[in-house]
Amino acid sequence: MSGGSEQVTGEAVAPQPVAKGRDWAAFVAAHKIQIAITLILVGLYSLFLTGNPDVFLRYDIYRSFMSTMPFFGIMALAMTFVVTLGEMDLSFPSVMGFSTWVFGTVYVSSESFLLALLACLLVGVIAGLGNGLLVAKVGIPSIVATIGTMFLWRGAVNMAAEGKGIALVSLRESPLHQVFVGRLFDDVLPMQFVWMVAIAVFLGLIYRRHRFGSHVLFVGDNAASAAMMGIKVDRVKIACFMLVGGFAALAGVFLTSEVTYFWPSQGDGMLLTTLAAVFIGGTSVFGGKGTLYGTFIGVLIIGSLEAGIVAIGLTGFYVQFLYGLLITVSVSIYALLLRRGG
Amino acid sequence: MTASESLLSLRRITKGFGKIPVLHEIDLDIGSNEIVALVGDNGAGKSTLIKVITGVHSPSSGEVWFKGERRNEHSVKRSREIGIETVYQERALADQQALWRNMFAGRELTNRFGFIDVAKQKAETERLLRRQMGFTSKAITIDSEVRGLSGGEKQGVAIGRALYFDADLIILDEPTMGLSLKETTRVLDFVKDIRRQGKSAIFIDHNIFHVYDVCDRFVILDRGRIAGDFRKEELSQPELVRKMLLLATTGSLDEEGAQA
Ligand SMILES: Nc1ncnc2c1ncn2[C@@H]1O[C@H](COP(=O)(O)OP(=O)(O)O)[C@@H](O)[C@H]1O
Ligand SMILES: [Mg+2]
């Protein structure tokens, strides 16, 4: 700690050559959670493959997984930011419902996919802004605030749609429909999965490599310290809730485009699967620690669990029990890993 | 000194939390290349005062001047940009984050799209760690999380961070709290370095011997008011100790006042 002025600023240090073995050990130590969840995925698929090779050695089931996972997977990726803050959002399925009602309504009246998309995203982001303001400015704990907005937006869609769905078959004629939910390579690769991968990579870069991600980690870890270092804590929180709102709306566009129908309960039932993907992925509910890679693998696991369980010959009655088992076991593993390694 | 001449000037700064007043009409000037001790009992308002200077708290009333300019809309981000760095009493570190993130928290080295130059942040942290802070333990690397560090090591990180950004005013709030003798000596050497580099510092410490050793001036804060302001030439160390004792026992600095 002692030394002259020349040490305060100036010359950079040459990167030190490190032995390959130490590099590898350091990588494992730093990525325990990611390795653990990858092993869980491999274990699960080994089970599926041995349980029913007929189904799991054919491509059909994977195409089906890839077409349905993005609907909640995209929201799980965005939710990772809110959970990293140590906050919670319970309203995103309702936000999805309301913003897709806007999507359907604007589409019906304008016949424009693009206009409907923009209106839908705007509504999602504004709903997220509302959550963010309630949490950061009004000071309501996020779990309470978003219970409120969860009912609010679901109520809004029920009032607006009066319980009726909207048929959107003509969406198929729009070129944007192909861009969002078309199939690449002669019905092999659903576009929504390509989008989900692209979004995962992009958000992963933001999370680990961008100033914003660094601020999210710092605020989630210690908001008082973050404020003392000049991080705008309120703004970071509001931005994360807006992110979730926007991506809930986008997920709604994918879902509505795929089925070419809007129904008022859209998004219902996605809350717990989405959160389960985040927590199985290893993001800490206490904040300050998380991984987008983990969430992505969590989506692959949650998104294939139900079909996998049925395919290996268990009835649908087992599904929830095995969800529960997988979640409790995986989060216990993370808790133990973190307690030991620090 | 006028507000436009000194490095930092506080004018009639008042601050309260809700109904509880903590600072009353504080006037204070810090010159360039001046090391000022801020002393006073626990709860006197020292930390609150420095948080007003750094923008963590905005004052209820009063003015903050820095480098000859009135600073309205003062914020932590802004105060760091204009050259104020702080080692907070709370240390302001994030336990689960790697050292290379903590070192640059709020002032990340980024490209114009906001993406962090991780290699550079790591190299700079490595340099600070090994040379500046003198960390020799192989167990501590730039990828270590803060929570594994000892109190002295954490303080080393907080101080290294404050010195890295080449600030003109460095504020240290009880930096020797809980440190070993050796670590304390290092911190005091740091403060001496600050003077040698021509910069200014505000140094808060309960140990009068530390304070007298490294500071040019002593400002005594008592229940939110400035009770005394002495230059080192005016006051010997025993006199400073006596004044502090007098203040603690009688609530006043001058002997006649104490009898009244
Ligand atoms: N954020 C805050 N909210 C309410 N009261 C506070 C806050 N920060 C400090 N105080 C109060 O202000 C007074 C001065 O505290 P502080 O500035 O930390 O004193 P010192 O650093 O001199 O020990 C104390 O009575 C403390 O309880
Ligand atoms: Mg204090």
Image (cartoon, helix red, strand yellow):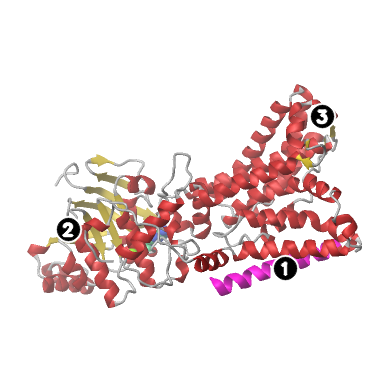
- Give the SS element for disc 1: helix
- Please indicate whether residue B124 sits to the left or right of residue B148 in the image: left
Spot occupied by residue A156 in the image (x, y as percentages of width and height): 74, 39
- For ligand 1, give the image quadrant: bottom left
- Give the SS element for disc 3: helix
> Label 2: few (<14), some or many (≥20) within 10 Å?
few
- Name the amino acid, label 1: Thr
Q: Dot 3 falls on which chain?
A: A
Choose mark 1 or mark 2, whichever is in front.
2
Choose mark 1 or mark 3, whichever is in front.
3
- Name the amino acid, label 2: Arg
Q: Dot 1 falls on which chain?
A: A
Residue B44 visible from this viewpoint: no
Q: Does A189 appear above or below B92?
A: above
- Give the SS element for disc 2: helix
Spot occupied by residue B210 in the image (x, y as percentages of width and height): 21, 71
Spot occupied by residue B24 in the image (x, y as percentages of width and height): 28, 54
- Please indicate whether residue B188 sits to the left or right of residue A250 in the image: left
Q: Provide the residue span drawn in magenta.
A: A319-342
Which residue: 65% across, 50% down? Answer: A77
Which residue carries the number 1 mark?
A328
Which residue carries the number 2 mark?
B196
Spot occupied by residue A108 in the image (x, y as percentages of width and height): 79, 26
The magenta stretch spans residue A328 = yes
- Mark 1 in CB contact with mark 2 (< 8 angstroms): no
- Please indicate whether residue A213 sits to the left or right of residue B137 in the image: right
Question: Image quadrant for the C terminus of chain B?
Answer: bottom left
> Label 1: few (<14), some or many (≥20) within 10 Å?
few
State whether the magenta stretch is mostly helix, strand or loop: helix
Which residue carries the number 3 mark?
A172
- Does the residue tagged 1 have its C-beta within 8 Å of any atom of ligand 1? no
Which residue: 25% across, 66% down? Answer: A2
